[in-house]
Amino acid sequence: MKSRALNRSLKLKIHKTLIRPAVTYGCEAWTLTNRNEQQLRIFERKILRKIVVPVQEENGIWRIRKNHELNELIGSADIVRFIKAEEWPG
């Protein structure tokens, strides 16, 4: 995910089509607790921070993206909302 050979939009597509479904496989059988939701969000933010490069501030200091910046990047569909939005037969 740190490769410069792939652009950011392609990396985000890879995340949404490969990584997220692999992580959420079998989620219809899960009982999501608050701790599980927090762990899933932390995992997703770690992946997104590897995709999105740090930002250089005006004073020349580099910093990682903040959570709200990552949320704007992926829209309103974080991994927990993705799991809860799935409609399972049965």
Image (spheres, grey):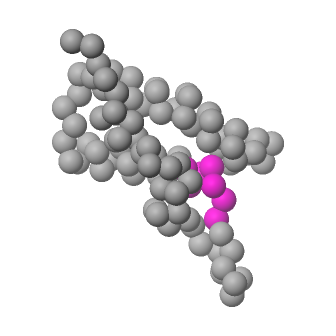
Residue sitting at x 48%, y 56%: 71
Report the magenta residues as a range: 48-54
- From what the image shows, is residue 42 above or below residue 23? below
Total count of labels: 0
The x, y position of residue 35, in whole percent, is: 23, 48
Residue in view at x 56 percent, y 29 percent: 17
Q: Which residue lies furthest to the top in this view?
A: 90
Give the residue furthest to the right: 5
Q: Quadrant of residue 81?
A: top left
Q: Is residue 40 magenta?
A: no
Give how far across and how far down residue 7 sits, in percent.
75, 45
Residue 36 can be seen, yes or no: yes
Report the quarter where the C terminus lies: top left
Tell me which corner region of the image, top left, top right, bottom left or bottom right, holds residue 58. Answer: bottom right
Residue occupying image coordinates x 52% and y 57%: 72
- Taking 8 as reference, is 29 left or right? left
Q: Is residue 50 magenta?
A: yes
From the viewer's perspective, is 80 left or right of 6?
left
Q: Write the residue at 62% across / 33% down.
A: 14
The residue closer to the viewer here, 43 or 12, is 12
Residue 19, percent from left and from top: 52, 32
Q: Is residue 43 visible?
A: no
Q: Where is residue 60 in the image (x, y as percent from the top left)?
A: 71, 83
Which quarter of the picture shows residue 78? top left
Q: Which of 76 and 34 is in front in this view?
A: 76
- Quick check: 72 left or right of 8? left
88 and 2: which is toward the camera:
88
Name the quadrant of the N terminus. Answer: top right
Q: Please, is residue 49 above or below residue 37 in the view? A: below
